[in-house]
């Protein structure tokens, strides 16, 4: 059963918001462009008045027989109209040039605003939104907005001005015929509402269907190897066909309505032209007194220009109606873009910052250069003083509770501490809460209850960027970016020198395979390092963490994708990297955590055992079962 089409909401507010945004981008250029549009619209509306004057002069000369003075007056009228058309041509050229700059410039600024907003959003947003659908904001939604800004809104403004101007001229010439035209236009508006309304609803649904389809395609592209390994091609095609069919049906319905609207309105306009001609003829035939704002008598010089105005009036009403679909599509895209821009950014109330420091007379002093000593700069609001605490890497969790969704707790009463230089390992089944703990230390998510202290400071008081700068992370899923190997390693610290990057690679055991690449450290990586093995990609991620040189390291399955021989190489590098640092290790391969200072065994979000490897083996509890049963938890 299909859902009932949703009507687009907040259209006027969205248009006003869009206009305010455009004015903020181009406060001078946009008003000039609007002035050009208005001038063109008015000029295109007034030829009927010149025609009426010419016909009135001819009619007067026909009755009086005086043709001598008419030629000069008609020439003056024609020259005036020619000058107006030349000015209109110039303003039209200026409008098109300015509109190209405004449209593309505004879209570039909006893409920039979206990307900047995206960088401020919490991890939760990306965990709960399809990545392909997010990408659709930058492609389809922006494209519908481009059409709306460059074509639909200018055409709507121009046609609306023409309609109002021509209506005023009609009322000035003959109220009777103007009423006939308005009756016909009422029919046109009724048809537009009935046909165009259905089209608008389906255009909104079409935009959402495009987002879902692109999201699925992006997901399939990322998982193409998995699809082929498990022979899932047929099922993937079936799923795509279902989404593609939904998009087809919504697009077909929307365009069917839209394609019906134009011919219907054009034919109503043609019929109205005939009705106005008959009405004008009957009024002249029966000598009906004219009712007009100008006091002009009803004559051929009024009826003939009125027919031209009828054509112009109905054509522009049709233009307004036809632009409605493009505007609705644009508003659907704008709504999705504004929804992204309106997403609440990641809350950061921290005021403790991380600074470089040096020791003078036994006290820490802030300095600009990198000294290898980091300190927490803690301003005290009470007395305005500032204290500095050396960054040591002392992390303590006290009675921490957490839930990703309210009412569904993931962690219960987690209490642990990691002293500077200690290695703390988390083991447990998938879903036990191991990675969640490290996400809380990073403040990717905020705890529901309890306290997390870093060097004695509540992490809620530390600015998130500074907190994360003090932590090095190697994730199980490695992300490499388009660029050279050197650039990917330098991602850990942008001001690192080539020598520091190479030293980090050697420390991680990555230098050996890097030097054997076609261009060594200058080798270009694309497609998330698709030309490297999974183990090589993981080694680069470890190198990236090493060059950041943080006092605290989080290793989430850092060696899970590395073979046994490479693991031995990496482990030596990791041991050197972890020397003197506080390290949190998440591992399924229990052989990698034997030398941890303390091992935390988690089950269903609770710490059920803790201690050294020897202690836990002696207790013959859960850890003993895991260790002696198999080296892999899964």
Image: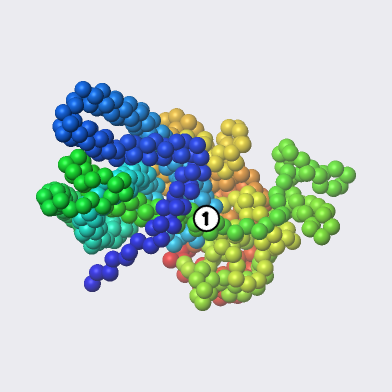
| Image point (33%, 51%), residue name | 327
In the rendered image, the quadrant that contains the C terminus is bottom left
| Image point (84%, 57%), residue name | 383
In the rendered image, the quadrant that contains the N terminus is bottom left
Looking at the rendered structure, the secondary structure element under dot 1 is loop
| Image point (29%, 53%), residue name | 324
Residue 470 picture location, percent across and down: 65, 51
The residue furthest right is 361
Question: Which residue is under mark 1?
Answer: 121
Q: Is residue 618 visible?
A: no
**Residue 515 sits above or below residue 116 on the image:** above
Residue 249 picture location, percent across and down: 21, 59
Quick one: 521 or 104, which is closer to the camera?
104
Question: Viewed as shown, does residue 589 lie left or right of 380?
Answer: left
**Residue 425 sits above or below residue 64 on the image:** below
Question: Please, which colouring scheme is shown?
Answer: rainbow
Residue 594 picture location, percent across and down: 58, 61
Residue 506 picture location, percent across and down: 56, 39
Give the image quarter of residue 494.
Answer: top right
Q: Is residue 205 visible?
A: yes
Quick one: 538 or 390, which is closer to the camera?
390
Quick one: 341 or 187, which is closer to the camera?
187
Quick one: 399 or 183, which is closer to the camera?
183
| Image point (18%, 53%), residue name | 288
Question: Viewed as shown, does residue 329 lie left or right of 558?
Answer: left
Q: How many discs mark residues in the rendered view?
A: 1
How many C-alpha atoms fall within 10 Å of the one at disc 1: few (<14), some, or many (≥20)? some
């Amino acid at each position: 059963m299909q859902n009932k089409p949703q009507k687009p909401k907040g259209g006027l507010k969205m248009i006003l918001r869009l206009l305010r945004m455009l004015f903020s981008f181009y406060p001078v250029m946009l008003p000039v462009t609007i002035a050009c549009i208005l001038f063109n619209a008015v000029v295109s509306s007034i030829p009927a008045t010149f025609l009426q004057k010419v016909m009135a002069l001819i009619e007067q000369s026909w009755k009086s027989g005086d043709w001598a003075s008419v030629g000069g007056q008609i020439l003056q009228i024609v020259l005036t109209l020619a000058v107006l058309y030349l000015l209109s041509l110039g303003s039209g050229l200026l409008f098109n040039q300015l509109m190209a700059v405004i449209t593309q410039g505004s879209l570039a600024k909006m893409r920039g605003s979206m990307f900047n907003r995206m960088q401020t959003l919490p991890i939760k947003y990306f965990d709960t939104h399809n990545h392909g659908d997010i990408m659709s904001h930058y492609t389809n939604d922006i494209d519908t907005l481009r059409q709306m800004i460059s074509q639909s809104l200018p055409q709507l403004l121009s046609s609306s001005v023409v309609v109002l101007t021509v209506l005023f001229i009609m009322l000035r010439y003959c109220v009777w015929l103007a009423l006939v035209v308005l009756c016909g236009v009422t029919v046109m508006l009724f048809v537009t509402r009935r046909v165009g309304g259905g089209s608008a609803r389906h255009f909104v649904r079409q935009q959402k269907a495009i987002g879902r389809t692109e999201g699925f395609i992006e997901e399939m592209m990322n998982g193409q190897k998995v699809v082929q390994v498990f022979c899932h091609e047929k099922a993937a095609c079936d799923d795509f066909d279902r989404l593609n069919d939904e998009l087809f049906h919504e697009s077909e319905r929307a365009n069917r309505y839209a394609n019906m609207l134009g011919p219907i309105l054009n034919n109503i306009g043609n019929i109205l032209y005939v009705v106005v001609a008959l009405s004008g003829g009957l009024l002249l035939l029966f000598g009906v007194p004219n009712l007009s704002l100008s006091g002009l008598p009803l004559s051929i010089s009024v009826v003939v220009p009125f027919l031209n105005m009828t054509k112009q009036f109905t054509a522009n009403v049709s233009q307004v109606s036809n632009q409605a679909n493009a505007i609705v599509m644009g508003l659907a895209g704008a709504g999705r873009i504004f929804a992204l821009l309106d997403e609440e950014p990641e809350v950061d109330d921290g005021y403790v910052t991380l600074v470089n420091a040096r020791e003078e007379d036994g006290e820490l002093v802030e300095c600009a250069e990198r000294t290898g000593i980091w300190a927490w700069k803690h301003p005290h609001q009470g007395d305005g003083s500032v204290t500095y605490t050396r960054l040591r890497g002392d992390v303590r969790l006290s009675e921490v509770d957490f839930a990703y969704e309210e009412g569904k707790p993931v962690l219960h009463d987690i209490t642990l501490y990691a002293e500077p230089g200690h290695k703390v390992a988390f083991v447990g089944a998938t879903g036990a809460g191991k990675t969640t703990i490290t996400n809380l230390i990073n403040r990717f998510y905020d705890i529901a209850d309890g306290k997390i202290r870093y060097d004695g400071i509540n992490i809620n008081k530390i600015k998130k960027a500074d907190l994360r700068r003090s932590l090095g992370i190697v994730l199980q899923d490695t992300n490499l970016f388009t660029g050279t190997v050197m650039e990917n390693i330098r991602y850990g610290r942008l001001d690192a020198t080539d020598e520091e990057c190479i030293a980090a690679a050697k420390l991680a055991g990555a230098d050996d395979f890097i030097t054997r690449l076609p261009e060594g450290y200058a080798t270009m990586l694309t497609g998330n390092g698709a030309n490297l093995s999974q183990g090589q990609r993981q080694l680069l991620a470890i190198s990236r963490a090493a060059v950041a040189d943080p006092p605290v390291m989080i290793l989430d399955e850092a060696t899970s994708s590395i073979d046994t021989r490479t693991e031995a190489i990496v482990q030596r590098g990791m041991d050197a990297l972890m020397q003197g640092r506080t390290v949190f290790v998440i591992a399924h391969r229990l052989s990698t955590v034997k030398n941890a200072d303390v091992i935390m065994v988690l089950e269903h979000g609770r710490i059920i055992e803790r201690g050294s490897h020897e202690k836990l083996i002696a207790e013959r509890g859960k850890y003993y079962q895991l260790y002696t049963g198999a080296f892999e938890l899964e």
